[in-house]
Image (spheres, rainbow, N blue to C red):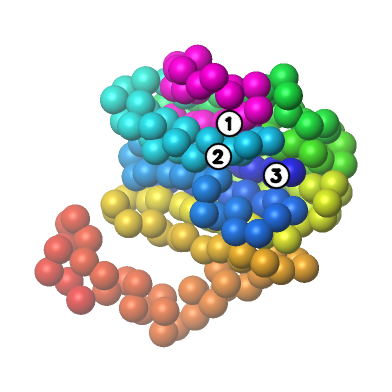
Amino acid sequence: MTFSIVAKDLRTGAFGVATATGGPVVGSLVPHARVGVGAIATQGYTTNPLYGFEGLDLLASGKTAKATVEQLVAADAGRERRQCIAVGRDGGVHAWTGAEILAYCGSLVRQSFGVCGNLLTGAQVLEAMVDTYESKAGQALEDRLIAALAAGQNAGGDQRGTTSAALKVYGSEIYPLVDIRSDWSDRPVDHLAQILEATRGEKYATFFKRLPTKANPGSG
């Protein structure tokens, strides 16, 4: 039903998560991230959005991604209907796929990033996401994440088609560097890319650069 990627940019320390699905408003429940802490995608046959909030708190307390995911699923009686992937401060990634999750389902974990999905057209969806993310090394994290989503969509994506997508990236501030959604579209990943490009236009980019920051709270 959903395919997602979480990542830590080892060059900048930024955390990001991107996701797409065959239903509406995937960005409302699945993607979660926090500055300096990590990123989580929580999905499945019945998504447990609490994994996002509780998981980030666990990561913030110093737990690894593996310990965080294990603690979340151990406390959840509905764990077999869940799928979750998290990346932590150290770049470690861990994923869980419950036994009742619909095929094709699975996850692929690499250093500093990982992908997971369910009700996909096949394993090639996740493989394409990994290959594309790795091939874009050196690009901005948000560009790499969108490229990975696009590769997954183009490789078959959700068996039902892909109709919503979302992207979150946190850099050095408590507010997101990027937080965009396409809630209902025939090509939601393409729409995300269009929205991202719009944020790079002169007017919005200038506006964003003037926002107060921790280092300069009186700016603007």
Q: Quadrant of the C terminus?
A: bottom left
Please name the amino acid that badge 3 sits on.
Thr
Q: Residue furthest bottom?
A: 203
SS label for mark 3: strand
Q: In the image, which disc is placed on residue 84? A: 1
Please name the amino acid that badge 1 sits on.
Cys
How many other residues sit within 10 Å of disc 3, few (<14), some (14-19) or many (≥20)?
many
Q: Is residue 71 left or right of residue 110?
A: left
Residue 153 place in picture, x, y as percent: 78, 53
Whether residue 204 is visible here, answered yes or no, is yes
Q: Residue furthest front?
A: 77
Q: In the image, which disc is placed on residue 2? A: 3
Please name the amino acid that badge 2 sits on.
Ala
Residue at position x 19%, y 55% in the image:
214
SS label for mark 1: strand
Q: Are marks 1 and 3 in contact (CB under 8 Å)?
A: no
How far, Cα to Cα, is label 3 from label 2? 10 Å
Q: Are marks 1 and 2 in contact (CB under 8 Å)?
A: yes
SS label for mark 2: strand
- Nearest to the observer: residue 65 or residue 158: 158
Q: Are marks 3 and 2 in contact (CB under 8 Å)?
A: yes
Residue at position x 62%, y 49% in the image:
19
> Total of numbered circles in the picture?
3
Q: Is residue 54 left or right of residue 195?
A: left
Residue 8 place in picture, x, y as percent: 49, 39
Give the residue pinned by disc 2: 41
Region in magenta: 67-89
